[in-house]
Image (cartoon, rainbow, N blue to C red):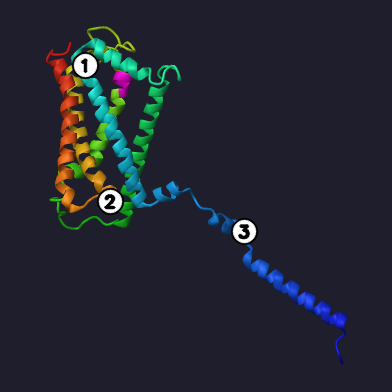
Amino acid sequence: MPVPVAVTSILTSMVTSSTVHTEALRRAPVTGTALQARKKRPFLLDLYSTSVGKKYAMAISGIAMMGFVLFHMIGNLKMYMGATALDHYAEFLRELLYPIVPKGVMLWILRGGLISMLFLHLHAAWSLTKLNRHARPVKYQGARDYQVAKFASRTMRWTGIIVLAYLVWHILDLTLGVVNATGTNGEFVTGEVYNNVVRSLDRPVVAAFYVVANILLGIHLFHGAWSIFQSLGWNNPRFNNWRRGFATAFATIIVVGNVSFPIAVIAGIVK
């Protein structure tokens, strides 16, 4: 018996509707998880989530801080030119982009950028340490070959911690004056950089601390300047001598310059 046309049409419509509905269920996410999975993170965050990205972050932040350390030391050499020269230099820094921005604002922006680089450097170092430990949870069973892993690289973590403590002290001492309130020449005075430096470094214990801290800073800088090229992928063996020479020269310049300040004050050359 032939099926009426109307019934055939209804059956066809039902089958088509069922097929479309099934296909929609197959394609549509049951929850929002599938939609979230399609969302991509910003490129820089995605890169930083990898070990390569963290090494790049350490290298770039390290370069920024190396630049600061170098120019900071060069500026402080004005101490040998007398109080007027050093105080004028400090005033110049406070007046950066003035009157476009109020006095001191640009200097604090630069300080904020430097602190951001510091935290990025610390976080990248901590994250890489965790990744390395996760990759090798079992310690080396035999003696390691320290011919390649020199003293500077093996003590990188500890010199970094001590340098961080030195940086905190340095800010409390010569930026905020919190620990620079006692001395034979009066109290800490904002803007009188020369007198503040001399008053602080005239204390033998503080001078010794600055000397030791800057030697450790030099060790940290030596390995940092050496490993920057490796972190960025520029580690061709043909350039190893050049890399070592650069790292040695940079660290030596910083140490000699910074260590000279407390020695000059204690020796009475700067007073």
Q: How busy is the neighbourhood of tag 2: few (under 14 within 10 Å), some, or many (20 plus)?
A: few
Q: Is residue 228 left or right of residue 259?
A: right
Q: Main secondary structure of the magenta part?
A: helix
Give the residue number, with chain letter if any, for mark 1. Answer: 79
Q: Residue at x 18, y 25 (%)?
A: 257
Q: Nearer the viewer, mark 1 or mark 3?
A: 1
Residue 136 position within the rendered picture, expressed as x and y whole percent measured from the top left = 29, 57
Q: What is the number of the mark on residue 31? A: 3
Q: How busy is the neighbourhood of tag 3: few (under 14 within 10 Å), some, or many (20 plus)?
A: few
Q: What is the number of the mark on residue 233? A: 2
Q: Is residue 200 left or right of residue 109?
A: left
Residue 186 position within the rendered picture, expressed as x and y whole percent measured from the top left = 27, 7
Q: Residue furthest bottom?
A: 1
Q: Is residue 147 left or right of residue 180?
A: left
**Image quarter for residue 10?**
bottom right
Q: Is residue 215 above or below residue 75?
A: below
Q: Which residues are magenta?
A: 171-176
Q: What is the number of the mark on residue 155? A: none
Q: Residue at x 16, y 48 (%)?
A: 240
Label located before the other in sequence (1 or 3):
3
